[in-house]
Amino acid sequence: MKPADTILTASPYLAVHGLTRRYGAFTALDGVSLALRHGEFVCLLGPSGCGKTTLLRQIAGLDLPDDGRITLQDRDITRLPPAKRDYGIVFQSYALFPNLTVADNIAYGLTPRRERARHRERVRELLDMVGLPGSEDKYPSQLSGGQQQRVALARALATSPGLLLLDEPLSALDARVRDKLRDELKRLQKKLGVTTLMVTHDQAEALAIADRVVVMNNGRIEQVGTPAEIYRRPASRFVAEFVGEANWLPARRADAYSVTVGAHTLKLAGVPAGEACTLFVRPEDILVKPRWEAAPNTLLARIADVSFAGAMTRLQLLPEGMPGVMLIAEVCPSMLNRQPLVPGEIVPIELPAELLVAYPEERA
Ligand SMILES: Nc1ncnc2c1ncn2[C@@H]1O[C@H](COP(=O)(O)OP(=O)(O)OP(=O)(O)O)[C@@H](O)[C@H]1O
């Protein structure tokens, strides 16, 4: 795992340095360091209680750290009041004023108040931008959840802030609205180039929307990387388990580049020190071969179950010579060029050496 400090770029837009927040004896943030480049979309991802919102609140100035610093374009903002930090924020609950119209909600932070005509024009522009043209005179209660969240986004962007903070903005919405708004949010963020930090506990959402994902656990950063890096090369077992689905196989180290699992020896790019380790392989990385041929990392497996999963077919496999191991594989039937797979059938499978990762046993 890389220490978080090593990801600090030369001149980040926003950076936190060794941020710590304690609540009594409990440490909610434990020396977190992180840097965001200008225009980047970064997601804070992690299980409930890992400190995501605490970190966002520190950056917003809604709570103060016990230790550490926050800088915005190299300026120390750690103790600045929220109004002086140049950000817009959207929360999970829409937090609109119910007694104000959409237009007044959006224009709320625009100053000076006397410039009503200019504000009206800005509100119109913002409503167009978030896909709600002509909604100026409606009240929040007349809007759906997705529409209210669009208004909240327009309000957050009204002053053209340099930083957009989003605290689970999509999680109260139903799945279809959430996916649509997620895509729109990403497009809008790229168009405006506003540096964005979003909290989510939804790994699929983080992978789909972010330029970089920050995986947090117990008040610390486990890994920072692009969605592909996080998914393909999880830096720890925690990240591998939290992001995506994986098979885990108990293994014993044979040498620096191979392990044994049951009666089989499997090759891989590297094996950690220590007698025992755990092998990680994604379901879609297991290859079902059209015919048997003796080759490295190739073995026979009995199909225990086949289930339809849309574009992919999902298999439960019991590899021969690996007692107690069951693998989940996802295969694309059109790639197989063979008869349909059926339960009870014995098929050759390959666990590709370059896609296997071994984690030390003590991290389990
Ligand atoms: N004001 C507070 N007083 C005491 N403990 C707090 C306070 N605020 C947060 N905590 C604790 O700090 C930890 C981190 O909370 P935080 O809200 O940052 O988690 P999170 O990762 O955002 O989780 P969730 O996804 O559930 O919102 C939690 O265990 C929480 O109970």
Image: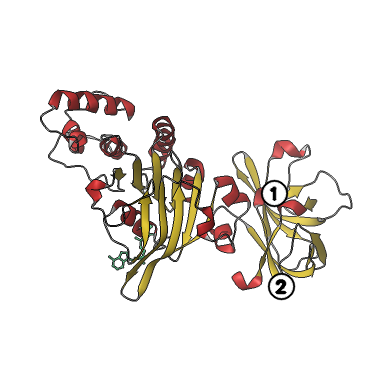
Please provide percent x and percent y for residue 225.
55, 50
Tell me, for residue 276, which label it has, or none.
2
Spot the residue most to the bottom. Answer: 25
Where 125 falls versus 350 (above or below)?
above
- In the image, what residue occupies the spot 63% across and 53% down? 233
Numbered circle sitting on residue 285: 1
Give the image location of residue 219, x and y in percent: 42, 64
Q: Quadrant of the C terminus?
A: bottom right
Number of other residues with Cα within 10 Å of mark 2, as a class: few under 14, some 14 to 19, many 20 or more: many
Q: Is residue 266 left or right of residue 217?
A: right
State whether residue 130 is above or below residue 47.
above
Element type where label 2 sits in the image: strand
Nearest the viewer among 126 and 172 is: 126
Relative image position of residue 275 (x, y in whole percent): 74, 74
Report ligand 1 position as a quadrant.
Answer: bottom left
User: Residue shown at 26%/55% (left/top)?
Assistant: 62
The amino acid sitting under disc 2 is: Ala
Please, what is the three-letter code of the amino acid marked with disc 1? Asp
- Mark 1 / mark 2, whichever is N-terminal: 2
* Front in this rendered view, residue 226 or 201: 226
